Amino acid sequence: MQFSIFVVSAFAALAAATPIQKRAVFSSTTYDAISISGGTAGNALDEANAVLNKLPADLSTVEKADLDFLNQVNQVANDAEKEAFNPAIAAATGAEADALAVCPSLL
C-alpha cells in the first residue's frame, strides 16, 4: 500500500512539474475557414469575435505560429481590399455600389 502511494505521488509530482505545452489555436485552419467577409452584412463583429475568442486572454502568450498565421491572413485581407474590393466599389454604380458599400460600424 505504501509503495503504491509513493508511486502515485511521484507521478503526480512529475506531472505537476512538467510544463504545459502551448498549442497554436489556428494550426489546423485556413483563411477561408476564419474569413468573415461572406455571410450576412452586419454580423462582422460577432463573427470576428467568434474566431478571435479562441486566442488566450493573455495575448502575450499567443503562439508564434498563431501570430504568423494571423499576419498572413492580415496581408491577404489587405491585398484583397486594395486590389479587388476597393476597385470594385469605385467602379460600381447604383444598387451594386450600395451593396458593396455595406459596412457595419465596429465602434
Image (spheres, rainbow, N blue to C red):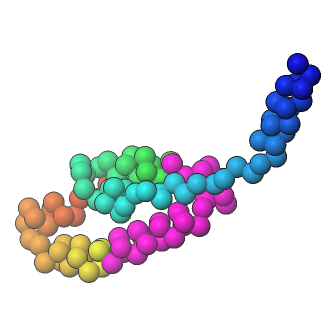
Residue 92 locus on image (x, y percent): 11, 73
**Magenta portion: prevailing SS class:** helix
Direction top: furthest residue: 1
Name which residue lies at 92% across and 22% down.
2
For the view shown, which residue lies furthest in the left direction? 94
Residue 19 or 77: which is nearer the viewer? Answer: 19
Residue 28: in magenta span = no
The span shown in magenta is 54-79
The residue positioned 89% from the left and 30% from the top of the image is 6
Asked whether residue 106 appears in the rendered view, the answer is no
Question: Quadrant of the rendered structure where residue 13 is?
Answer: top right
The answer to whether residue 1 is above or below residue 74 is above
Q: Give whichever of 46, 64 is nearer the camera.
A: 64
In the rendered image, residue 62 lying in the magenta stretch gets the answer yes
Could you say which is closer to the camera, residue 52 or residue 45?
52
Residue 101: x and y in percent read 22, 64
**Frontmost residue, 5 versus 94:** 5
